[in-house]
Image (cartoon, rainbow, N blue to C red):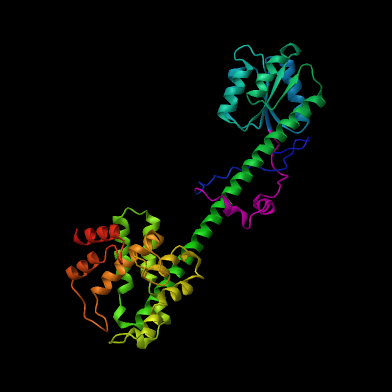
Amino acid sequence: MALRLDGRSVFPEMSPTPLDLLSGHSTLISDGLSLSSLDDALPSPDVTAPPARMLVVDDEEAIRFFLHKKLTEAGFACDQAEDGLQAIQRVEDDSYQLVICDIRLPDIDGLEILRRIRSFDEDIAVVMLTAVTDINVAIPALKAGASDYLVKPFNVDQLLLSVSRALEKRSLTLENRLYQQTLETRVVERTRELVKKNIDLSRLFLNTIESLIFTLEAKDMYTEGHSWKVALLAANTGRALGLDAAMVENLSLAGLLHDIGKIGVRDTILNKPSKLTTEEYLHIQQHPVVGERILRPLEPLKLVLPCVRHHHEWFNGKGYPDGLAGENIPIAARILTIADAYDAITSERAYRPARSRDEALSIVRGAAGTQFDPRHVEAFVAMMEG
């Protein structure tokens, strides 16, 4: 509680319960948070609050009475204790903002009293009294947490100045703690707001993906469910190869979106029951590039774009659109192309009937080293047969 020299309160005591912070978001507080906004959270000054309560501890009755009289005249509420045990009992039974304590007491050393007071309530300010010959003892007292010390003999001005300094230091400590608690509360509130916004954005993002997939499947009746099955096969293959969770998630997204570029392919080509002409084949080969272009504005999909673009590359370099070979092809694309081919082989198309599972696996094995990465083929086949 901050006080003026007349002893009246400027700020009331506040002890809000601190909230547990969420881990690792240090940048969240930069948006919409300032000292002025924290000031708004503090209560208005309450000039009607009771005066600060103090305890005077000294075995010399004359000094106790002098301190009690002068502090009471200055507007403070003041009690007395004649020894250490009585002082500790009063601190435990009552509420004080400041204790003035002699270092030399007959029963308990003043430094021990200081330590006990600080352990009981670290917000109590303590001013130590010391004789001139005890100056070297005052230094350890300050290190132990005393706010100030007075050297006997002292006058009223020195007393009130020391009390004022001690209460001001206590006030600043409490205000700083309140700022910290208010800041923590604002961080938690802001974090919750951002988490909610992220959840809403994620839902919108997923709904956008779903809409794109439905748009594609409505365009090509033979690919209904193809994207979902490819996503599942690719993700399971990634897990079988020991890829981390983030890579598996990207594989799943790439599986869902790998053919999105077919939205730009003419319906007559997609559903043509006969062999494609050279011009038509070149046209359909552009769908990975078109897909990448469609998805590029979606920032959360930036790691998926290479997989979408390169899922028709061949391990021997004879695929499209860029003719990449071997490990120059992104690992996710090398996995996705196997899942894509397998599901295409086992699904009915306008130009051919579906093949059996065993036939499809045999075709996939036969393309290891040419169309597919041999190591990924081995993992895929083991997963399908396991």
Which is nearer the eye, 17 or 316? 316
Label the magenta part by its dominant secondary structure. Answer: loop
Q: Above or below — where is 349 with respect to 112?
A: below
Point out residue 224 in the picture as x, y percentages from the top left corner: 30, 78
Point out the image quarter for the C terminus: bottom left
Residue occupying image coordinates x 82% and y 26%: 157
Q: Above or below — where is 86 with respect to 335?
A: above
Residue occupying image coordinates x 26% and y 69%: 342
Point out residue 154 in the picture as x, y percentages from the top left corner: 80, 20
Examine the image and state in which quarter residue 147 appears.
Answer: top right
- Tally the numbered discs: 0
Instruction: Please give left or right for residue 371 compared with residue 50 in the image.
Output: left
Point out residue 44 in the picture as x, y percentages from the top left corner: 69, 50
Which is nearer the eye, 316 or 212? 316
Examine the image and state in which quarter residue 16 appears.
Answer: top right
Q: Is residue 111 magenta?
A: no
Residue occupying image coordinates x 78% and y 31%: 74
Point out residue 316 in the picture as x, y percentages from the top left corner: 34, 65
Which is nearer the eye, 240 or 90? 240
Point out the image quarter for the N terminus: top right
Does residue 75 appear in the picture of this structure?
Answer: yes
Q: Is residue 30 magenta?
A: yes
Instruction: Please give left or right for residue 330 compared with residue 117 in the image.
Output: left
Q: Which residues are magenta?
A: 23-52
Does residue 80 appear in the picture of this structure?
Answer: no
Examine the image and state in which quarter residue 379 appears.
Answer: bottom left
Q: Above or below — where is 240 with respect to 274?
A: above
Which is nearer the eye, 370 or 154? 370
Instruction: Please give left or right for residue 112 compared with residue 138 in the image.
Output: left
